[in-house]
Amino acid sequence: MEPANQMVHEHQPKWEGKACAELRGLKAEQVWPLLEDFFSLNKWFPTLTTCLPVEGVSGQPGCIRYCAGFKTPANNGDEIVNWTKQKLLSIDQSELSFSYSIVDGNVGFNSYVSTVKVVPMEDGCMIEWWYEVEPVEGWRLEDLDSFIGSGLQVMAKRMEEALTVAA
């Protein structure tokens, strides 16, 4: 990228988005432990084959996980294994929420920060996933919205199935 283009790219506002998924008939307190386990995202997020502890204790701020295996719209069918290292920034047991950032990776997510929260509802609960990131080369904001939104829908379905079988 030429320096002039790079400067323009660096000054674009961050992308922001939010995805939501409802889990009917399940209490927030049932769903929260599945999300709270920071090192087990691969059990729930589609196309994520690996989620390993790198540093710290799962659920404690400062812990880092290594996630790999997912494909993104920027792959264009290439057989590249995408990976990120994600750091837990904060966790709030009473609010059923946590925030994390991507601290390293090969997917071009710079300054990515996300907050995930489980919200009680009358007939179940909802997972809310907010995110912000600098514009990602080779992506459109719609691509990111779709990637996270569709991934969250599959996560919710997998969690419903796991909790229904366990009941």
Image (cartoon, rainbow, N blue to C red):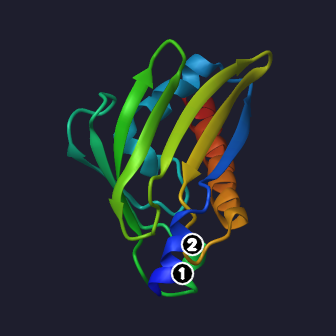
Q: Is residue 140 above or below residue 61?
A: below
Please state which amino acid type lies under the numbered disc 2: Val
On residue 5, the disc is 1
Q: Secondary structure at mark 1?
A: helix
The furthest residue to the right: 122
As measured in the structure, the alpha-carbon distance from the residue carrying label 2 to the one carrying label 1 is 5 Å
Residue drawn at 58 percent across, 46 percent down: 131
Labels 2 and 1 touching (C-beta < 8 A) = yes
Q: Position of residue 30 (x, y in %)?
A: 56, 21
Residue drawn at 69 percent across, 48 percent down: 153
Count residues near mark 2 (Cα–Cα under 10 Å), then give few for <14, some for 14-19, many for 20+.
few
In this view, the residue in front, 67 or 138, is 138
Q: Give left or right: position of 80 versus 116.
A: left
Please state which amino acid type lies under the numbered disc 1: Asn
Q: Give left or right: position of 110 versus 164.
A: left
Per the image, the residue denoted by label 2 is: 8
Q: Can residue 48 be seen by looking at this rendering?
A: yes
Residue drawn at 63 percent across, 31 percent down: 164
Residue drawn at 55 percent across, 35 percent down: 116
Q: Is residue 2 above or below residue 69?
A: below
Q: Position of residue 65 (x, y in %)?
A: 31, 48
